[in-house]
Image (cartoon, rainbow, N blue to C red):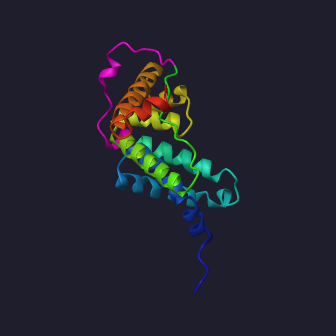
């Protein structure tokens, strides 16, 4: 049997990172797979530089984010939202998604995994115009300004959509967590 190409190991190492980044933004597994495949095609073209780079994961995440955003704007109807026509309110630093306690034992770890799955499923039900900026801000670490630039919308729209996404997510999670959500997020 011949030795596998080093790129195969590279793909195995980063495939979950790339796919989950795309899935969070696209909310469609088939579309996320397409984007992940495109990311790795580009990575193959630059493999000589990436193979030993300590920032390969960051590069892949950035490419996956950009390709997912391009996919959203190219293959889905143009974004035109009611929030663009209303007066926006400033984001007053409203709290983000719920924070869960650290797992102390196997039962707590399982419960935490279940909670993260519930949050993930609720996140995927948000409309694109709310989910995408929320994911970019909280999970990808982009600033409001970067998000506005990536999406080609105003800063006020980004703030409004993130605020509305947090509220929608909070309402959805209240069904699963009840008062526990308010206690952990005053």
Q: Does the rendering let one see residue 10?
A: yes
User: Magenta stretch containing residue 76, yes or no?
Assistant: yes
Q: Where is 31 relative to 81, above or below?
A: below
Picture quadrant where residue 174 is located: top left
Toward the top, the furthest residue is: 87
Q: Main secondary structure of the magenta part?
A: loop
Residue 86 image position (x, y, % from top left) = 33, 15
Residue appearing at x 31%, y 41% in the figure: 76
Q: Image height check: is 42 above or below 80? A: below
Q: Which residues are magenta?
A: 72-92
Q: How many marks?
A: 0
Residue occupying image coordinates x 36% and y 12%: 87
Image position of 171 (left or right of 145): left
Query: What x and y, as percent, mark residue 129?
Result: 37, 32
- Residue 89 drawn in magenta: yes
The one nearer the camera, 167 or 4, is 167
For residue 39, say whether it is visible: no
Comparing 83 with 105, the one in front is 105
Quadrant containing the N terminus is bottom right
Q: Is 4 placed left or right of 41 in the picture?
A: right
In-front residue for pair 83/138: 138
- Residue 34 is situated, as x and y percent measured from the top left of the image, at 40, 55
Does 128 appear above or below 148? below
Image coordinates of residue 113 in percent, x first then y, are: 47, 52
């Amino acid at each position: 049997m011949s030795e596998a190409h080093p790129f195969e190991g590279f793909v195995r190492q980063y495939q979950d990172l790339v796919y989950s980044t795309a899935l969070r933004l696209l909310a469609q597994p088939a579309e996320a797979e397409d984007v992940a495949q495109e990311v790795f095609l580009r990575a193959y073209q630059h493999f000589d530089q990436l193979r030993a780079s300590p920032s390969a994961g960051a590069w892949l995440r950035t490419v996956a984010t950009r390709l997912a955003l391009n996919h959203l704007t190219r293959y889905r109807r143009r974004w035109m939202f009611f929030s663009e026509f209303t007066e926006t309110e400033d984001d007053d630093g409203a709290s983000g998604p719920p924070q869960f306690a650290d797992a102390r034992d196997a039962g707590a770890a399982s419960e935490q995994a279940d909670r993260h799955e519930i949050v993930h499923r609720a996140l995927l039900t948000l409309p694109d115009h709310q989910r995408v900026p929320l994911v970019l801000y909280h999970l990808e670490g982009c600033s409001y300004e970067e998000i506005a630039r990536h999406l080609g919308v105003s800063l006020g729209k980004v703030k409004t959509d993130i605020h509305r996404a947090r509220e929608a997510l909070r309402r959805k999670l209240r069904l699963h967590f009840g008062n526990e959500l308010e206690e952990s997020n005053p």
